[in-house]
Image: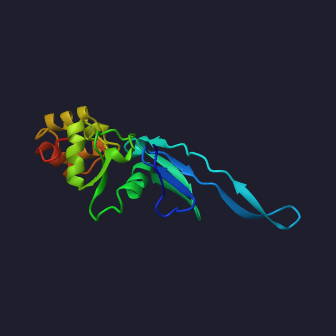
Amino acid sequence: MTKWKDVVGFEGYYEVSDDGRVRSVDRVVLCVNRWGQQAPRTYPGQELMAYPNEKRGGYRYVNLHKEGQKMRRVAVLVAEAFLGPRPAGTQVCHRNGEATDDRAANLRYDTPKGNAADQSLHGTRRKGESHPMARLSDSDVDTIRLLHNLVPKADLAERFGVHPGHISNIQNGWRRGK
């Protein structure tokens, strides 16, 4: 049996289920008709289409409207409704490592360190060239390491479009790059 609860901050507008679905609720709004008179208009509720955002880790998002549009992560909505308020310094974590599995039973609050450990365990940690902010490929990192003490760091930095300190960190092993 699916349980529905109000979305925190959008009470009376949207509900979220324990299986990770979001819907708008039926509501009646007073509108002005073409004759200038106020008349009630019924807006039927419907399930919202959640979309995965690949730039943000593949997590599912929905657009909610209440005094402007707000893009919200479905996992956060489910956790706030079924797990309660998020404790300070914690993140919403997926127990099974699936970014699109937003069931309440699959979510928990944990520290960033615990979340990173889960990502390593599940193989979903984005690092190296798979990270969306990566500026260097794995072959670029290998080339930088091969040219250690052969080409000045400033020249390598200009060639690869990064700061010389980044080149130094890669060559000294402080940034693994992979």
Q: Nearer the viewer, residue 79 or 51?
A: 79
Q: Quadrant of the N terminus?
A: top left
Q: Residue furthest front?
A: 1
Judged left or right of residue 170, residue 100 is right
> How was this image coloured?
rainbow
Residue shown at 28%/48% (left/top)? 162
Percent from the top left, x then y, of residue 31?
76, 64
130 shown above or below 61 = above
Residue shown at 10%/45% (left/top)? 172
Judged left or right of residue 92, residue 169 is left
Percent from the top left, x then y, of residue 13?
57, 59
Residue shown at 29%/37% (left/top)? 129
Percent from the top left, x then y, of residue 48?
56, 46
86 shown above or below 78 = below
Is residue 133 in view? no
Q: Nearer the viewer, residue 51 or 18?
A: 18
Q: Nearer the viewer, residue 167 or 51?
A: 51
